[in-house]
């Protein structure tokens, strides 16, 4: 698949939406914010808030304070509003509207968390918002339906925009017979391309004015980010810094001197190579002013 197909598939399966005004449950990662537990305890003073660790009853239970939790917020409108705003600036989790009970939801999510990667003996961290849409894109149609079945609507902020996906509120007795939940190594690997598509789509919106020269902004950004990855820059922060250089200097800037020389320096870390190229760009801009 080419960049355009990755982007269009992601936008189809996880379309953009507005911030949810109402929802029932949240899956939050306690490791994402050290103040989250304190917020929860404070919230229970004025509203009815119940929550459960998804590590409960498993070998991971001792690590519950740095793992995912399910929160019932059906009777906590104030906390819902506060959390929705917080998720726009911090990638902490996912929101769900659902007619299922909290226990049905907890059992379903725990199953996917622990049983999806048996060969690697790892957790499927589906609750990470930046990876939620990529995961939905690589699952088979049946697996995706089974995963989303316990909710009517799923919402998350991927660091750029709000996205949503529809479930079907499948009855709990049907979920128990929905088959295995294994996610293959190939599917996980392919999800990385969809993550890049999500980043490209988000940055294309954010840098819209600077991308006026391109016919397909998101595709242009995707290709730039792909070049950055090939050059060894893998984190989201490094990718955006590479993109800013490409917007200033052109998509092929890394093939010209002195940037090519900086990239080829094995004695420099990726961070130092980026700093070197950014310094070169600033110096060139100053000389041309």
Image (tube, rainbow, N blue to C red):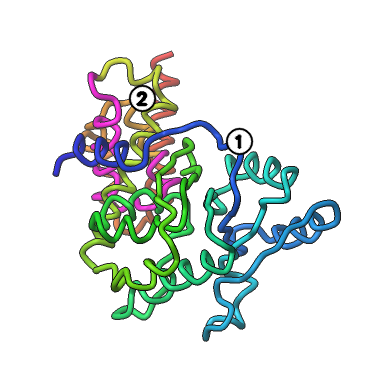
What's the distance in space between the residues labelled 2 and 1, CA to CA? 39 Å
Say above or below: 133 vs 56: above
* Residue 266 counted in the magenta span: no
Viewer-closest of 7 and 217: 7
Q: Residue at x 38, y 72 (%)?
A: 176
Split into 4 quadrants, where in the image is the N terminus? top left
Q: Residue at x 40, y 52 (%)?
A: 132
Viewer-closest of 37 and 203: 37
Would residue 172 be found to the left or right of residue 90 on screen?
left
Instruction: Read off the residue under disc 2.
Output: 248
Split into 4 quadrants, where in the image is the C terminus? top left
Instruction: Read off the residue under disc 1.
Output: 21
Q: Secondary structure at mark 2?
A: helix
Q: Are marks 2 and 1 in contact (CB under 8 Å)?
A: no
Residue 80, image x, y percentages: 68, 45
Residue 158, image x, y percentages: 46, 44
Residue located farthest toward the bottom when viewing the structure as drawn: 59
The magenta span reads 215-240
């Amino acid at each position: 698949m080419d960049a355009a197909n990755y982007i269009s598939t992601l936008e189809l399966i996880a379309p953009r939406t507005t911030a949810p005004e109402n929802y029932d449950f949240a899956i939050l990662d306690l490791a994402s914010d050290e103040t989250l537990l304190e917020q929860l305890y404070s919230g229970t003073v004025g509203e009815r808030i119940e929550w459960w660790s998804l590590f409960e009853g498993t070998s991971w239970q001792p690590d519950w304070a740095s793992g995912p939790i399910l929160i019932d917020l059906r009777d906590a409108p104030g906390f819902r509003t506060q959390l929705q705003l917080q998720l726009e600036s911090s990638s902490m989790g996912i929101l769900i509207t659902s007619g299922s009970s909290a226990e049905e939801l907890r059992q379903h999510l725990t199953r996917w968390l622990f049983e999806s990667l048996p060969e690697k003996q790892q957790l499927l961290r589906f609750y990470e918002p930046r990876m939620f849409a990529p995961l939905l894109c690589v699952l088979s149609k049946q697996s995706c339906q089974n995963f989303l079945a316990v909710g009517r609507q799923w919402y998350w902020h991927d660091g750029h925009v709000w996205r949503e996906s529809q479930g079907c509120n499948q009855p709990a007795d049907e979920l128990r017979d929905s088959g295995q939940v294994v996610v293959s190594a190939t599917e996980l690997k392919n999800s990385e391309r969809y993550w890049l598509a999500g980043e490209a789509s988000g940055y294309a919106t954010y840098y819209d004015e600077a991308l006026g020269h391109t016919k397909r902004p998101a595709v242009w950004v995707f290709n730039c980010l792909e070049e950055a990855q090939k050059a060894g820059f893998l984190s989201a922060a490094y990718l955006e810094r590479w993109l800013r250089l490409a917007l200033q200097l052109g998509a092929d800037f890394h093939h010209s001197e002195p940037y090519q020389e900086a990239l080829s320096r094995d004695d420099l870390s990726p961070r130092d190579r980026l700093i070197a190229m950014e310094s070169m760009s600033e110096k060139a801009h100053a000389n041309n002013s």
